[in-house]
């Protein structure tokens, strides 16, 4: 796990995993708790956490894309779209990022 922190690509992969987990917790746990049990506390916590991880993922994707000279039309856009879809960052990590 600590080896991921030594390269920009490794950091992107780690942030992607964390961003994916935060999205799943937000939409799978926090939002249902808010609407079903009228308990908004977890949304108040996870919303900003997920937002920060989302921004870090986007910024790091663009940075890695520039450093690794990714073609936007073939790689960068796929990685960026992944953070909008539940489980997307896990899929992209396995199909694209882990092979680089």
Image (tube, rainbow, N blue to C red):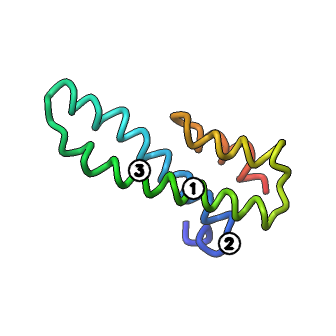
| Residue 55 rendering spot, x and y as whole percentages | 52, 56
The residue to which callout 3 is attached is 50
| Residue 1 rendering spot, x and y as whole percentages | 55, 65
Is the C terminus in the top left, top right, bottom left or bottom right quadrant? bottom right
Distance from label 3 to label 1 (Cα)? 10 Å
| Residue 51 rendering spot, x and y as whole percentages | 42, 51
Q: Which residue reaches farthest top? A: 36
User: At x 49% / y 50%, what residue is drawn?
Assistant: 19
Q: Between 92 and 39, which is closer to the camera in this rendering?
A: 39
Distance from label 2 to label 3 (Cα)? 23 Å
Q: Which mark is residue 57?
A: 1
Between disc 2 and disc 3, the foreground one is 3
Along the polypeptide, which appears first: circle 3 or circle 1? 3
Which quarter of the figure has residue 42? top left
The residue to which callout 2 is attached is 7
User: At x 19% / y 24%, what residue is drawn?
Assistant: 36
User: At x 26% / y 51%, what residue is drawn?
Assistant: 45
Distance from label 2 to label 1 (Cα)? 15 Å
């Amino acid at each position: 796990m600590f080896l991921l922190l030594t390269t920009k690509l490794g950091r992107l992969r780690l942030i992607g995993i964390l961003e994916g987990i935060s999205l799943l917790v937000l939409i799978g746990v926090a939002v249902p708790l808010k609407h079903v049990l009228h308990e908004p506390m977890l949304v108040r916590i996870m919303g900003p956490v997920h937002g920060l991880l989302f921004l870090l993922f986007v910024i790091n994707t663009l940075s890695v894309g520039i450093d690794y000279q990714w073609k936007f039309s073939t790689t960068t856009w796929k990685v960026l779209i992944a953070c909008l879809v539940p489980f997307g960052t896990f899929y992209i990590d396995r199909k694209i990022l882990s092979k680089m």
